[in-house]
Image (cartoon, rainbow, N blue to C red):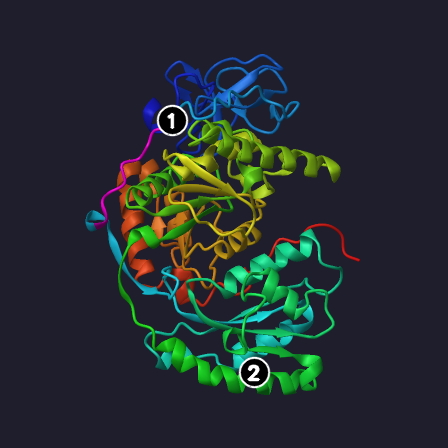
């Protein structure tokens, strides 16, 4: 069998190659004989590795041999492990930071978006119904259902969306509640939201006044005309009375929201959340590097890609610190990595509890390997800032937001921070939308794309097939991103997905 057609060696220093196709036991590949059947995307040993020694892929350490590995062996969970979990990484802050020449405004790509009063630009135009706590969530859901379909008669209106939460009731003002308030406020004040109302029960921990002030939605001295419409169920007489009262107000607000019109805007107004879920071993070879190429185009045009999922950059964080714009930015990232190490240890597990079973079935063995592939989404631009969960993303250029690796929680933080689009790669087939931000889904391999084409917007598997380069797919993703920003429906939007994925990060204990 032709060696190049069967396996892919990603770096000269690698001990393993990636199987392009299923390799049966006994397959002869030049000087190698496959000693065990190896599924497509999984790792084939091309060099001997002694037990306890490092194993490299992408030219980087992906783990330690837990048994002797011989050329031709299948390398996976039976002979590759996390080791101590501590790598001697060379962080070298700023050493590889190369400034990007951002195009002048007149040369930047454009899209048709909704310009808001504060200068931000939305890619969609929703009216949001925000619940301060789980106690008010049923009312918010009922209100969204009452106005379901209103968008069909209004060209510049995308509908009423309910932002519900399972938190907000017990407890008192503290880190967890402030985090929830910041997240909810980020959605209420999002550029893709033309207006909002807030519904509360009345006695919950997330008090209406605290939420509005702490979330930054109104000033302490705000007058009545500056306050958003708010509804407290205990004051209004219960569930149905609140639904009726809020519905009357929303009915008057919808025409005002729908009066907005798209205008031609620079790509510099795009803030794009980068996500990967249901990853496989091809994620770091096809889709994620293509998203990285797209992210670099975005930065060159003045825009902002936002990386997340901090536990899924663990073991690859040095690739970001080396291109941080300052030691302070590198230190912010390393501080978040340290927090995650401490947090996982506090709960009795390690960061290597990620990858998930589906990731492993797709050929990913350790968190180091998964992280090296995930970081490829960030491209090669300088890291300009690191922000906390759901904090506003204000810098231009590549930003990292500290989020968990769980996709809905991570995307919730990114959108709360201002991301007006999401790009989401998958190798196993995650089905994902995210209102109010359109979600562009990217398949890592052609069989997945063909099997789940109704969910996938772009097939990055053509890279592995040899039909296109990473740069070509990156350019195609950038073009599709502009189309979605301008109103074209992603496949998840066309199916109505994206409400259930709203999932604020819940910290601490429940009292």
Q: Is residue 494 above or below residue 429?
A: below
Q: Residue at x 63, y 71 (%)?
A: 137
Residue at x 58%, y 87% (from the top left corner): 244
Quadrant position of residue 456: bottom left
Query: Is residue 319 depicted above or below 310 in this figure?
Result: above
Residue at (50%, 78%) from the top-left corner?
A: 225
Left or right of residue 107: residue 59: right
Q: Quadrant of residue 222 in the image?
A: bottom right
Farthest-out residue, left: 106
In magenta stretch: residue 103: yes
Q: Which mark is residue 139?
A: none
Residue 14 visible from this viewpoint: yes
Q: Which residue is mark 2?
A: 246
At numbered mark 2, what does the secondary structure look like: helix, strand or loop?
helix
Q: Nearer the viewer, mark 1 or mark 2?
A: 2
Disc 2 residue crowd, few under 14, some 14–19, many 20+, Cα 10 Å: many
Out of 87 and 27, give the one closest to the viewer. Answer: 87
Secondary structure character of the magenta stretch overall: loop
In the rendered image, residue 202, in percent from the top left (x then y), is placed at 70, 75
Looking at this rendering, what residue extends furthest in the front direction?
Answer: 221
Cα–Cα span, label 1 and label 2: 59 Å
In the rendered view of the protein, which quadrant contains the C terminus?
bottom right
Percent position of residue 505, x then y: 62, 53
In this rendering, the answer to whether 278 lies above or below 463 is: below
Q: Give the magenta part as a residue range.
A: 97-105
Residue marked by disc 1: 8
Mark 2 or mark 1, which is nearer the start of the sequence? 1
> For this view, does 126 lie left or right of residue 140?
left
Q: Are marks 1 and 2 in contact (CB under 8 Å)?
A: no
Residue 179 belongs to the span the image colors magenta: no
Report x, y in % for residue 43.
48, 27
């Amino acid at each position: 069998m032709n060696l190049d057609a069967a396996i892919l060696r990603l770096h000269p220093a690698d001990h393993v190659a990636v199987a392009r196709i299923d390799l049966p036991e006994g397959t002869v590949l030049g000087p190698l004989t496959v000693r065990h059947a190896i599924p497509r995307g999984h790792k084939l040993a091309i060099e001997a590795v002694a037990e306890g020694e490092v194993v490299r892929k992408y030219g980087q350490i992906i783990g330690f041999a837990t048994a002797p590995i011989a050329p031709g062996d299948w390398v996976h969970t039976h002979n590759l492990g996390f080791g101590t979990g501590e790598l001697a990484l060379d962080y070298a802050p700023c050493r590889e930071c190369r400034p990007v020449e951002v195009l002048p405004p007149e040369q930047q790509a454009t899209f048709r978006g909704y310009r808001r009063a504060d200068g931000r630009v939305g890619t969609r135009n929703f009216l949001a119904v925000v619940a301060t706590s789980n106690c008010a969530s049923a009312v918010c859901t009922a209100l969204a259902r009452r106005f379901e379909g209103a968008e069909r008669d209004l060209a510049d209106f995308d509908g009423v969306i309910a932002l519900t939460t399972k938190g907000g009731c017990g407890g008192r003002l503290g880190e967890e509640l402030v985090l929830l308030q910041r997240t909810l406020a980020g959605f209420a004040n999002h550029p893709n939201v033309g207006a909002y109302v807030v519904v509360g029960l009345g006695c919950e921990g997330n008090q209406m006044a605290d939420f509005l002030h702490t979330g930054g939605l109104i000033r302490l001295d705000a007058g009545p005309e500056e306050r958003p419409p708010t509804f407290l169920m205990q004051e209004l007489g219960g569930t149905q009375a609140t639904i009726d009262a809020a519905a009357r107000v929303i009915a008057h607000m919808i025409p005002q929201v729908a009066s907005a019109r798209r205008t031609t805007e620079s790509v510099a107004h795009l803030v794009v959340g980068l996500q990967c879920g249901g990853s496989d071993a091809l994620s770091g070879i096809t889709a994620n590097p293509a998203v990285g190429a797209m992210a670099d185009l975005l930065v060159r045009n003045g825009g902002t890609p936002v990386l997340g999922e901090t536990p899924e950059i663990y073991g690859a964080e040095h690739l970001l610190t080396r291109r941080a714009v300052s030691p302070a930015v590198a230190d912010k990232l390393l501080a978040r990595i340290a927090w995650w190490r401490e947090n996982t240890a506090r709960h009795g597990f390690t960061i290597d509890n990620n990858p998930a079973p589906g990731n492993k079935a797709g050929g990913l063995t350790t968190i180091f390997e998964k992280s090296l592939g995930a970081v490829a989404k960030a491209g090669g631009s300088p890291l300009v800032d690191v922000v906390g969960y759901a904090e506003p993303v204000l810098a231009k250029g590549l930003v990292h937001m500290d989020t968990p690796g769980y996709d809905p929680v991570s995307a919730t933080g990114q959108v709360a921070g201002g991301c007006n689009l999401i790009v989401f790669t998958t190798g196993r087939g995650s089905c994902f939308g995210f209102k109010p931000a359109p979600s562009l889904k990217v398949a890592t391999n052609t069989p997945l794309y063909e099997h789940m084409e109704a969910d996938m917007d772009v097939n990055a598997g053509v890279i592995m097939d040899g039909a296109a380069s990473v740069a070509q797919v990156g350019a195609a993703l950038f073009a599709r991103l502009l189309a979605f920003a301008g109103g074209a429906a992603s496949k998840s939007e066309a199916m109505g997905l994206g409400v259930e994925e709203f999932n604020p990060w819940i910290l601490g204990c429940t009292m």
